[in-house]
Amino acid sequence: MQLSKTVSIVKDLEKFVDTFTETIQSTCRRTFKTTSTSNKTNKMKSVPWWRKRINALRRHYQRTRNEEELRERRKRKYLEERKKYQNEIKKEKFNSWKGYCSVTSSVNPWSQVYKLA
């Protein structure tokens, strides 16, 4: 109600609209938290912690050059951890597939036909 009275009184409507818009924008800038997105953050994907660990072990092994004994220990540790990591991935893929198949059998009416065939 008061805004409509002000608009009818104001002779320069454009100036009033600009002032009003600026007031709303400044209030929003102060009130709301804004985040800036850069192209770099969008391109780089986060790596899970277990993958970071494997990569770190590989880098430690590769950067050890002077001490052969230390290099061999780091190589063994890296290869062991990588093998564990690969086994875990295979196990999780299999469990995921099993879960998917059990869910689709209740939803998909053709699953029984394929099982019988």
Image (cartoon, rainbow, N blue to C red):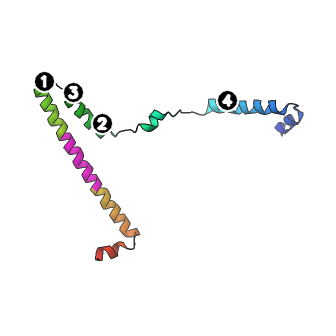
Q: Quadrant of residue 3?
A: top right
Q: Which residues are magenta?
A: 80-93
Residue 1 shown left or right of residue 28 in the figure? right
Pick the residue in front: 108 or 40.
40
Q: Nearer the viewer, mark 1 or mark 2?
A: 1
Image height of 47 relative to 63, above or below: below
- Which comes before the other along the chain, label 1 or label 2? 2
N-terminal of the two: label 4 or label 2?
4
Q: Are marks 4 and 2 in contact (CB under 8 Å)?
A: no
SS for dot 1 = loop
Q: Which residue is mark 3?
A: 63
Mark on residue 67?
A: 1
Q: Are marks 3 and 2 in contact (CB under 8 Å)?
A: no
- Asked whether disc 1 touches disc 2, contact meaning CB atoms under 8 Å apart, the reply is no
Residue carrying label 4: 26
Identified by mark 4, the residue type is Ser
Answer few, some or many: residues within 10 Å of disc 1's Cα (few below 14, many 20 plus, some between 14 and 19): few
- Which kind of residue does numbered mark 3 sit on? Arg
Q: CA distance from mark 4 to mark 2?
A: 42 Å
What type of secondary structure mainly makes up the magenta span?
helix
The reply to whether the C-beta atoms of the residues labelled 3 and 1 are less than 8 Å apart is: no
Q: Which residue is mark 2?
A: 52
